Image (cartoon, rainbow, N blue to C red):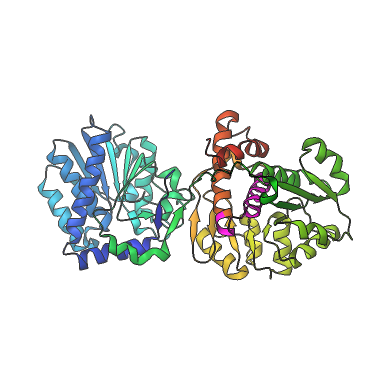
Amino acid sequence: MTQLKLYPAEVIRTLDRRYVQEYDTSGLKLMGKAARSVLAFIESEMPNAERAQVFCGSGNNAGDGFLIAALLADRGWSVEVFLVGDSAKLGSDAAAAMNICRDSAAMLTRVDGREVEALLIDSDALIVDALLGLGVSGPVRPAYQSVIAAINSANARVIAVDVPSGLNPDTGVADVFCIRATATVTFIARKIGLYSQDGSEVSGQIVFDDLGLPEPLIEHFDEAVVSTLVASPLPPRPNRWHKGPLRRVVIVGGNLGMGGAALLAAEAALRSGAGLVSVVTRGEHLSGFLARCPELMVRAATDETDLTDAMDQASAIVIGPGLGQDDWALNLFDQVMASEKPLVIDADALNLVSRFGLTHPRTVMTPHPLEAARLIGQERVNEDRLGTLKALIHRYGSVAVLKGHGTLVGDGTRTALNRSGNPGMATAGMGDVLSGVIGSLIAQGFTLWDAATLGVAHHGSAADTAVSKTGEAGLLASDVVSGIGRSLAGLH
C-alpha cells in the first residue's frame, strides 16, 4: 500500500485560490482541467456508456459538472443537466461554465430539490454528482436531500466530482443524505475525509488528479499533512543475532476474570520479535498462561508486590490489558508510572490515567473512542477525530493512537492515518494485541513514533490477511497474533 498525503479542506481551498492568483490561470481553466480529468476516467472505465445525468448545485463544484456535461454532449452522449441550486448564487466561473453547457447539446433543467421524484433518475444512465463537493459544512440542506436520496435509490453508476455530496471532507463523516458513489475523481490534493470514517465506504474507487498543481505551492503546507501508514517490513536480522539485543517486554495486567487480555498482549509481543516477554498478573493465571504459551515468563502479583526488579529488567512496559481498577491494579499502576522505562498505556490503565493524570514523559497511549473521551473530559468523542487526537496529545504530551476505523497516530508534530484493517476487528482482544505489538517494537529499539505507526499498520495488515481465511464474523484476536510475524516480515 502506497503512502499518501492527505490535506484538510481549508488548505485545498487555499491551494486552489493561490494556483489561480500566482500561476497565470483562472478558475474556469481549472474547472476545464477537472472536467477533462473526469471525462478521461469515464472514457477509460465506461467506454460503452452513452447517456448521462449531471446534477449541479450552486457552488464551484457545479462549474465542473456543467463542463463535464458539455464535454460528454460534444461526444454524442445524451446528457441531461439538473440545476438543483440557485443559479443566482453561482460564482462568475461557475456561471461561465453554465453558459458553456447551455451552448452545448446538453439539456439543462432547473429542478426544485424538495419536489424531485425517484422517476427523475435514469438508472441506466451514468450519474455525475456535482452538487456540493467541498461545500459541506453542516447537515445537507432540504433542497438537496430528496435529490441525493433519489440518486442513491436508483442504483445507478455514480461519479462524484471531488467529494461525494454529503461527505465532510475533513472528518470523513457522511450525512444521512450522502451520495454513495461508484467512483470519486478528486482534485488538487487528496482530502482527509475520503480516506477516513465513512469516506472509504461512500467514495467508491478514488481517482486523483492534481491538475498540474505546482510543487512549490503545496510544500508550504507540510504541517497540515496527514500521511497514510504503510506496513513496511522490518529489516532483516544479522546472522549472529541472539535474544539479548532484542531485550525484554514486561506486560502488566490480567486481573481476575481478565487474564486473556494480558495473555494476548504477551503473545503478540513474542510474535512481533521481542526476545523475552514477562507477564505480571494474578497468581490464579500462572498455570493457564504457561500451558498456553510456555515461551512466556509469568510472575504472580498481589496487592503489595514490589515490581522494582521486573521493571529494572524491562526495555519497554505495556500496562493495562485486563488490569482493572481495584487495589491490586492501583498498586501496579503507581509503580509502573513511577518508572523511567518507555510505556504503552492501554485499556484500564488509560482509565486510571484519566483519574490520576500522567507525568511520564515516554508513553504511547492507545485509547478507543470511549477511553479517549474520558481522557479529555468529555462524555463521548465527537465526529472530529483529528481534533480529539490533538486534544489527547496537548493534555498528555504522549504519542497517541486513537483506535477505530481509520486509526489515527499523532505526536504533536506528525499525524498519520491507517487504511488497513477491517470490520471483523471489532471483537474482544484486538486492542490488547496492538499494545503488545507496539511494546515489542519499542523494546527492539524503535522510537515511540515508529513503534506506534508500524504497530498499527501491521496490526491491520495481519487482520486483513487473517480475515480472508476466517471471514469477518469469525475473526478472533488470536488469529491476528498468529499472522503478525508474517506481516512484519513482509510475507503478506
> Is residue 448 rendered to the left or right of residue 313?
left
Residue 176: x %, y % from top left: 46, 49
> Which residues make up the magenta segment?
430-450
Across the whole image, how many numbered discs are drawn on residues? 0
Looking at this view, name the residue that lies furthest to the front.
240
Q: State the residue in front, 329 or 73.
A: 329
> Is residue 169 rendered to the left or right of residue 265?
left
Is 152 placed above or below 435 here? above
> Is residue 444 rendered to the left or right of residue 115?
right
Q: Is residue 171 visible?
A: yes
Q: State the residue in front, 252 or 185.
A: 252
Residue 263: x %, y % from top left: 75, 44
In which quadrant of the rendered view does residue 452 lie?
bottom right
Magenta residue check for 227: no
Looking at the rendering, in which quadrant would you find the N terminus?
top left
Q: Main secondary structure of the magenta part?
A: helix
Residue at image location 54% in from the left, 57% down from the top? 409
Looking at this view, name the residue that lies furthest to the left.
103
Residue 25: x %, y % from top left: 17, 62
In which quadrant of the rendered view does residue 45 lie?
top left
Q: State the residue in front, 300 or 431.
A: 300
Q: Is residue 422 visible?
A: no
Residue 323: x %, y % from top left: 77, 54
Magenta residue check for 435: yes
